Image (spheres, helix red, strand yellow):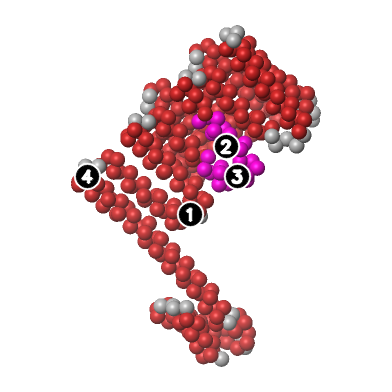
Amino acid sequence: MKAKYLNELKEVLIEYRASNKDLNDILSDYDQLYEDALASGKTDDEVWQMLGTPREAANELIDTLQRRKEKNIKTKIIAVMPFISLIVFFVLGFYQDLWHPGWLVFLAIPMSAILLQARLKDGIVALMPFLSVIIFLILGWGYDLWNPGWMVFLSIPVVAILLHTNVKELPVAISPFVAVIAFMILGFEYNLWNPGWLVFLIIPMLGILHEKNLLKVFVYELSFALAIGFYLYMGYVEGSWGYGAIGFLLPVAMGLIFGDVKFMVGNFSEEERKKAITMVGIIVVAIGLFLALGFGLGGWAWAWQVFLLIPVVAIILFDKVRLTALMPFLAVIIFFSVGYFFDMFHISWLAFLLIPITAIIENA
């Protein structure tokens, strides 16, 4: 019976075009497995049941061998990529005098590892920082578009959201990044920092659309529209942007009426109450500071960064304080501040490298 099992297994493996080495190794292993099973007191029928039919065993083995071969090929490609990159770099340098930006070929080392080892969606997300850097540098060196070329880095979170968010939640999820892009274009291209900041209101206005009560949706959207209209009227016609900002109390009032904005009067612990009051205070301070910097110093172009205080404080108050969670917001502040105030967008993008560096240090 053992000879019959091994012969059938051999025939199936030959049918599947297993190499001679794999064939001999598999037959030797199964010969030993069969002998060990018989020695333990099992009958031939029980051994066949334990090992599976020759074809079942061969199917499983061939799949394993195929995966192993693919893994070995991928591992070899990843292993030789540093040498390939080095050769290409020297060829570009010596023969084309392209030492710069020829060094970009070294990005092929991490990119090849990502492409060959990660799942499709995860691989695309992981590749985006490298692709963003390449596109950014091409725009900068090739066309002197460091600004607004830096906005390509927004594609990193946008792509991650697009690939991991369901369709229903997608508009709200990407709205902050769309708002930032629109705000920057209005500011840099048309010097409309104010009232360009109004584009950020698309975030709550899109979020309201998830409300099931159509009356509430209509009232909220109308209150935002009226507030925006009043703000623009007071600013452009009356020349009083400050008084125009009072109109935004209307959406807040609607929130109070519908009960979506409420004061904490229930059974909350003292710690929870303090945290909630702190968050409300930070939101109010951020809004006030933004408007003060905008109206007082004309800082609409950079004052929006104060709103990053809101998620930072929320993480500190309600989550385990880890620098990894805070670093994306700090990196944005460093990136934009250095780029805007010192005209160094071509260098300040390096601030984004602090995110993976911090994650590595904290998780090492």
What percent of the width, then of the height, locates residue 208? 69, 32
Query: SS class of the residue under badge 3?
Result: loop
**Mark 4: secondary structure:** helix
Q: What residue type is labelled 4?
A: Gln
Q: Which disc number belongs to residue 118? A: 1
Q: Distance between the residues labelled 4 and 3?
A: 45 Å
Circle 2: residue type = Ile
Comparing marks 3 and 1, which lies closer to the viewer?
A: 3
Label whose residue precedes the other's in the sequence (4 or 2): 4
- Report the mark closest to the observer, 2 or 1: 2
Q: Which residue is drawn at 52% across and 43% down?
A: 159
- Pinpoint residue 351: horizontal percent, then vertical percent: 43, 33
Position above or below: 22 against 4: above
In space, the residues marked 3 and 1 are separated at their CA atoms by 19 Å
| Residues at circles 2 and 3 in contact by the CB criterion of under 8 Å | no
Q: Can residue 32 be seen in this view?
A: no
Which residue matches tag 3?
165
Of labels 4 and 3, earlier in sequence is 4
The residue drawn where x is 63% and y is 20% is 228
Give whichever of discs 2 and 3 has the lower sequence position. 3
Q: In which quarter of the image is residue 171?
A: top right
For this orientation, the residue located farthest to the left is: 95
Q: Name the residue under label 4.
A: 96
Q: In this view, does 165 lie above or below 214?
A: below
Q: Which of disc 4 and disc 1 is earlier in sequence?
A: 4
